[in-house]
């Protein structure tokens, strides 16, 4: 079922600017113990501040089209590196989420964004940037009849039309576990279907209110069954919220049982004092151990490190998984 009563598309990027509402307390960190918000972080988490010429050019270009990137909305520590490489992750359907995850820096509230021309504007930007691998994600839009699936369909089709050489990776919400919205997206055969489970099942009530771990795992399994060999499946987790090593490995095992092929693991970094605290910072050697455990379970590509994020070097992860399958 398609979203109805879409407003007439405005004529300029300036007129497309939208007004949103957000909740005062985005993450609900009260009563949860962890490391102090303003403490000095370990040296392996230090990265240069963004500001190179390519970064500034892309920032101006993306803002001129009134587009959103998860790189900025989620305060990704790799934004400088990725944008200097000429890659970015586009966030469609606005910048206000209908859910309220305790770790996420994206605004939460009542969305007002509805622009039927957004898929074409994203595809235009992908072509302008000359991307070989584009990642498209979105906020949760539980307010829409198909939870935003039609927007993903539009973006995939538009990129394939305007930049046919570009690989397309989608990072979607769980669509409330509904099969029809998922089937609409998979029908377009994105090269990679990504849905992040984010954390271990035990921490879902604290970190992912409104979501369900096994529902997310089922979405990933269905995506693989629907897409077959034409679609790679991918998921990502964070550490630092209070999980244990064995819990992480068990979560990896469940994901493999649900046909996930590509895995990313990174350190959680607290966006504000209102978000969930960091319980501890994992050492780079622990990430190496997680990566080795994941490969032993049969994942075809694993990126694990303190600064790894779901879309970090996404093109390389997809290439590795494809090559391993062909070997």
Image: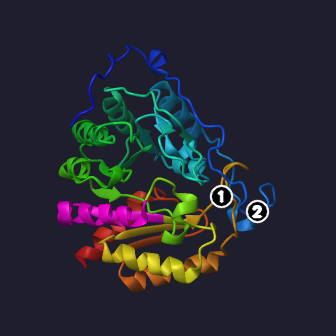
The answer to whether residue 108 is left or right of residue 250 is right
Other residues around mark 1 within 10 Å, as few (<14) / some (14–19) / many (≥20): many
Is residue 98 within the magenta segment?
no
State the residue position of label 2.
Answer: 41
Residue 56 left/right relative to 132: right
Q: Residues within 10 Å of mark 2 (few under 14, many from 20)?
A: few
Q: What span is colored magenta in the figure?
A: 212-236
From the image, give the main secondary structure of the stretch colored magenta: helix
Query: Taking 267 as reference, is 118 above or below it?
Result: above
The answer to whether residue 284 is above or below residue 311 is below
Circle nearer the N terminus (1, 2): 2
Question: Quarter of the image holding residue 192?
Answer: bottom left
Quadrant of residue 9 within the rendered picture? top left
Which of the image's four quarters has the C terminus? bottom left
Residue in the picture at 49% in, 46% down = 99
Taking the spot 46% from the left edge, 56% from the top edge, the residue there is: 311
Where is the N terminus found, in terms of image quarters? top left
Observer able to see residue 78: yes
Q: Position of residue 121 (x, y in %)?
A: 36, 30
Mark number displayed over residue 269 = 1
In magenta stretch: residue 229: yes
Q: Residue placed at 71% from the left, 61% from the top?
A: 32
Picture coordinates of residue 75 (x, y %)? 61, 47
Closer to viewer: mark 1 or mark 2: 1
Asked if disc 1 and disc 2 are in contact, CB closer than 8 Å, the reply is yes
Residue furthest to the bottom in view is: 296
Q: Is residue 72 left or right of residue 130?
A: right
Q: Residue at x 40, y 40 (%)?
A: 141
């Amino acid at each position: 079922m398609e979203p109805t009563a879409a407003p007439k598309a405005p004529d300029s990027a300036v007129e497309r600017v939208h007004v949103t509402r957000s909740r005062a307390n985005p993450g609900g960190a009260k009563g949860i113990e962890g490391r102090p918000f303003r403490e000095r972080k370990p040296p392996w988490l230090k990265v240069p501040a963004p500001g190179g010429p390519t970064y500034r050019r892309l920032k101006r270009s993306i803002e001129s089209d009134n587009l959103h990137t998860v790189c900025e909305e989620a305060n990704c520590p790799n934004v400088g590196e990725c944008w200097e490489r000429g890659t970015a992750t586009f966030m469609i359907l606005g910048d206000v989420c209908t859910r309220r995850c305790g770790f996420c820096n994206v605004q939460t509230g009542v969305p007002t964004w509805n622009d039927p021309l957004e898929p074409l504007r994203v595809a235009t930007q992908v072509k302008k940037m000359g991307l070989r691998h584009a990642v498209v994600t979105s906020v949760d839009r539980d307010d829409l009849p198909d939870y935003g699936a039609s927007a993903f369909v539009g973006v995939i089709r538009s990129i394939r039309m305007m930049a046919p050489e570009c690989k397309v990776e989608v990072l979607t919400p769980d669509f409330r576990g509904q099969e029809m919205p998922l089937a609409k997206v998979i029908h377009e055969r994105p090269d990679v279907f990504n849905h992040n489970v984010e954390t271990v099942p035990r921490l879902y009530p604290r970190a992912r209110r409104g979501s369900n771990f096994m529902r997310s795992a089922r979405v990933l399994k269905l995506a693989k069954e629907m897409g077959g060999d034409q679609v790679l499946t991918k998921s990502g987790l964070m550490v630092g919220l209070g999980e244990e090593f064995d819990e992480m490995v068990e979560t990896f095992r469940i994901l493999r049982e649900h046909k996930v092929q590509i895995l990313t693991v990174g350190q959680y970094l607290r966006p504000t004092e209102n978000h969930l605290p960091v319980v501890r910072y994992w050492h780079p050697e622990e990430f190496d151990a997680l990566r080795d455990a994941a490969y032993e379970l049969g994942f075809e590509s694993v990126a694990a490190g303190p600064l790894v994020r779901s879309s970090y070097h996404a093109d390389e992860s997809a290439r590795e998984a494809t090559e391993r399958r062909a070997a």
